[in-house]
């Protein structure tokens, strides 16, 4: 098929017609060469946001973005190496718990992760709360860490999917961030460029998720799996509940502390269950375990202390102060903690998790703009969660004001406004809703 002009390419997508894979590849290559202008790429992004993409188009876009830079194919370097990605949420520290836990079971894990923006916290921001922790690693450093420790979490290098970086900068200012095909291609271009043996996706749904409706979350999960077709990376997805904060802590230093406690066997049940479900899938995908034996070896890694010891070794391998595992006073400490108390007896019927997450952001625990600085000590502790019974006056949350000052606002009262109460318990929802392969 002869190549079509940029004008015809954009006009075809504007009318909602499908594009052939060769034309998509040519368009992305031309953009990287400078033959397609930013305003033309913006027109393409908006047309995709309006009309969507067919499965074949999406796969072609993902392949083109993946091929725009380095392709590591770590699965050729290691017998098996697993990867995991979450669409993000409030209190989502699953990657931090899962990584050393799976590695302690003899299965290698590496992740290229990101920083937070908006109400969803970033894994790398949380890890930065560990004194000395180095997230910016070269490919050689990542491979060395995996070789010696069995795991690594690092930021994506400049050579990985450069087309995505340029396209995301345009999406961020043109109202096209929430397009499912564009989200899918963005996520998977980076994941597939790393080239793990298997990838487990944690797709959140609910009031604190990027996709709040279950059908939209399911559509995103299916699109992510489809985008990996033919890549050599076996991909599965779990749809998990983000109608409530995950665990107790939402912030940075407090989430690392909660992750350590979970690896010690003292963490909140919801965080343990969600992380364990994803860890089981990685162990099964490695071929070394089935569902039953995977669960047993994970439980043993906690009980024996192997997962906690792996955490110490991993933190040290990436330059961090591993003594924080046994002395959490070494983390940045809040200058003040304000208690939030229940105004009445009954049950917590719902938490507006998105609003609660944005309150944490405004306290300094997250970013509204990329250049915003994180206050590691700021955060929220949700002592009670949706479905819990409370009495009037019970402490249901604690607002941790960070080490640096923020504008004077009644954050405790704002947080209380996010929490609803009822006379009876709400219908319970499982933490893991669906498993897609």
Image: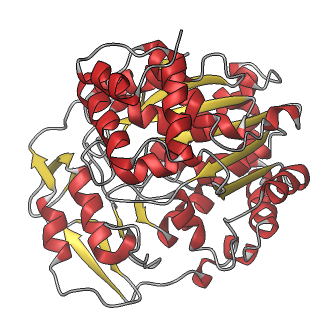
Q: Is residue 95 above or below residue 79?
A: below
User: Residue 231 appears in which quarter of the rendering?
Assistant: top right
Tell me if I can see residue 276 in this picture: no
The C terminus: image quadrant: top right
User: Residue 316 appears in which quarter of the rendering?
Assistant: bottom right
State the residue in front, 140 or 374.
140
State the residue in front, 236 or 395.
236
Q: At which x and y percent is residue 284?
A: 72, 23
Q: At which x and y percent is residue 329?
A: 58, 83
Residue at x-position 83% and y-position 24%: 288
Tell me if I can see residue 51 in this picture: yes
Determine the residue located farthest toward the top in the rendered image: 1
Q: 188 left or right of 351?
A: right
Residue at x-position 38% and y-position 48%: 38
Q: 249 left or right of 425?
A: right
Residue at x-position 76% and y-position 67%: 318
Q: Is residue 359 above or below residue 219?
A: below
Q: At which x and y percent is residue 105?
A: 80, 40
Q: Is residue 127 above or below residue 3?
A: below
Q: 194 left or right of 201?
A: right
């Amino acid at each position: 098929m002869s190549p079509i002009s940029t004008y015809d390419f954009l006009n075809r997508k504007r009318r909602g017609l499908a594009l052939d894979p060769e034309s998509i590849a040519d368009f992305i290559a031309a953009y990287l060469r400078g033959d397609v202008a930013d305003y033309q790429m913006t027109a393409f992004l908006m047309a995709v946001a309006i009309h969507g993409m067919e499965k074949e188009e999406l796969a072609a876009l993902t392949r083109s973005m993946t091929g725009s830079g380095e392709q590591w194919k770590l699965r050729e370097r290691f017998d098996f190496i697993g990867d995991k990605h979450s669409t993000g949420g409030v209190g989502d520290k699953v990657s931090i718990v899962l990584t050393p836990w799976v590695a302690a079971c003899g299965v290698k894990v590496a992740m290229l992760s990101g920083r937070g923006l908006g109400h969803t916290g970033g894994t790398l921001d949380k890890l930065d709360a560990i004194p000395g922790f180095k997230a910016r690693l070269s490919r050689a450093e990542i491979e060395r860490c995996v070789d010696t420790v069995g795991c690594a979490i690092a930021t994506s290098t400049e050579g990985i999917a450069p087309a995505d970086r340029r396209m995301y900068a345009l999406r961020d200012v043109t109202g096209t961030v929430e397009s499912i095909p564009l989200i899918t291609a963005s996520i998977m271009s980076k994941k597939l460029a790393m080239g793990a043996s298997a990838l487990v996706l944690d797709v959140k749904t609910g009031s604190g998720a990027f996709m709040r409706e279950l059908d939209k979350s399911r559509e995103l999960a299916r699109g992510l799996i489809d985008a990996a077709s033919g890549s050599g990376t076996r991909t599965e997805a779990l749809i998990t509940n983000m109608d409530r904060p995950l665990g107790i802590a939402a912030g940075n230093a407090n989430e690392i502390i909660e992750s350590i406690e979970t690896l010690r066997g003292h963490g909140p049940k919801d965080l343990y269950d969600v992380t364990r479900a994803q860890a089981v899938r990685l162990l099964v995908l490695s071929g070394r375990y089935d569902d039953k034996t995977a669960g047993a070896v994970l439980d043993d890694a906690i009980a024996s202390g192997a997962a906690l010891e792996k955490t110490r070794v991993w933190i040290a391998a990436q330059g961090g102060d591993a003594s924080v595992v046994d002395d959490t006073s070494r983390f940045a400490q809040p200058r003040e903690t304000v208690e939030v108390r229940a105004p009445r007896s009954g049950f917590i019927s719902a938490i507006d998790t998105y609003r609660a997450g944005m309150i944490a952001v405004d306290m300094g625990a997250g970013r509204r703009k990329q250049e915003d600085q994180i206050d590691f000590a700021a955060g929220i502790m949700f002592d009670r969660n949706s479905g819990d019974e409370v009495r009037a006056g019970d402490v249901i949350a604690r607002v941790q004001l960070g080490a640096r000052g923020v504008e004077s606002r009644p954050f405790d009262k704002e947080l209380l406004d996010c929490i609803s109460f009822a006379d009876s318990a709400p219908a319970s929802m499982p933490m893991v809703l669906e498993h897609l392969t």
